[in-house]
Amino acid sequence: MEGQYYGWGTGADGWRKGPWTPQEDQLLIEHVKLHGEGRWNSVSRLTGLKRSGKSSRLRWVNYLRPDLKRGKITPHEETIILELHARWGNRWSTIARSLPGRTDNEIKNYWRTHFKKSTKNVDKARARYLRLQQEHKQLQQQQQQQQQQLLLLESNIVKEETTSLTEEAIMVQEMQEIAFMCSNLPFMYQEEGLVGESTTSSEDRSSEEETCYDTWDNLWNLDDMEITLGEQALTFY
DNA sequence: AAGTGTATCAACCGCTGTGCT
DNA sequence: AAGCACAGCGGTTGATACACT
């Protein structure tokens, strides 16, 4: 795909469009090395590139950035995407921030390819996620209350605490919760090589795989679906 | 081998938010 | 306060690769 010219040519506005050539990439890379990210509209003036600032920024962010992770989305990343999408919906850039090296475009494309068609499944996953989150928070509250009661008994001092979390802090806290939940997911088994690439029938599953499915089903419990998310996810790899 | 359908992904478009003058 | 430029976001499109018949 790269390095070929498919006749997109120059638009009416004078900007070149279509796939980037290696020469154009090189110019853009040199520009960012010299001037840093930002000031995208000055790229064409300073480099001679016939690309709009918008196009330059997109090319850099989605393809040329050195910290980009190449290769397929891992099962663990997929789990995080599912979780975060259940929380934030189509806020791809927000989701991307939790997946270092992945771009919003990449995640968006991945989502559309793998989950868009099964909106029913995703809706159920979302409902289940929200319920789990609720339960998780209730559990936390209970633990906090127990702890407070304990402290009261010990010191006999009543102390009121008020915590004011910023929205960002709440976001971070939720991310940590999600990360914690994700860390217990069955995909870990798969990453460790305990699960086969594509398993569709329960007869084929090893005991480790059963554990994997059990864990997954416990989380999502999508048995009533036409295709469960667990199976779907595993089928892709 | 050829035709057709589907998946993938780069790149575009339109819109919105933000900062500066 | 208004207007403008720019950056960023989400949705969509189009070309290629791959799978299937």
Image (cartoon, coloured by chain):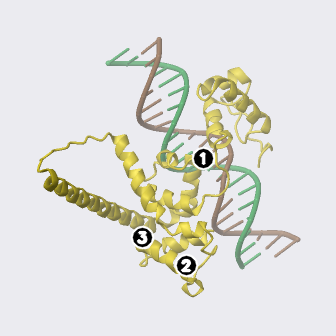
Chain colours: A yellow, B brown, C green
Badge number at residue A101: 1
At x 44%, y 76%, the residue is: A225
Q: Which mark is residue A75?
A: none
Which corner quadrant of the image does residue A77 belong to? bottom right
Subunit bearing disc 3: A
| Residue type (three-letter) at the residue carrying disc 1 | Gly
The image's mark for residue A220 is 3
Question: Do the residues at discs 3 and 2 belong to one chain?
Answer: yes
Quarter of the view holding residue A16 = top right
Residue A29 vs A204, above or below: the answer is above
Considering only vertical position in the picture, is A86 above or below A165? Answer: below
Tell me the quadrant of the picture where the C terminus of chain A can be found. Answer: bottom right
Q: Position of residue A37 (x, y in %)?
A: 61, 29
From the image, tell me which residue sits under label 2. Answer: A208
- Residue at image x 54%, y 67%? A187
Place of residue A34 in the rendered image (x, y in percent of width and height, measured from the top left): 69, 24
Q: Are marks 3 and 2 in contact (CB under 8 Å)?
A: no
Q: Secondary structure at mark 2?
A: helix
Amino acid type indicated by mark 2: Glu
On screen, residue B3 above or below A90: below
Left or right of residue A44, residue A184 in this image? left
Chain of the residue displaying label 2:
A
Instruction: Report the residue at 55% width, 47% height from top.
Output: A104
**Quarter location, residue A220:** bottom left
**Residue sitting at x 70%, y 37%:** A17
Q: CA distance from mark 1 to mark 2?
A: 31 Å
Does dot 3 land on a helix, a strand or a loop?
A: helix
Q: Residues within 10 Å of mark 3 (few under 14, many from 20)?
A: many
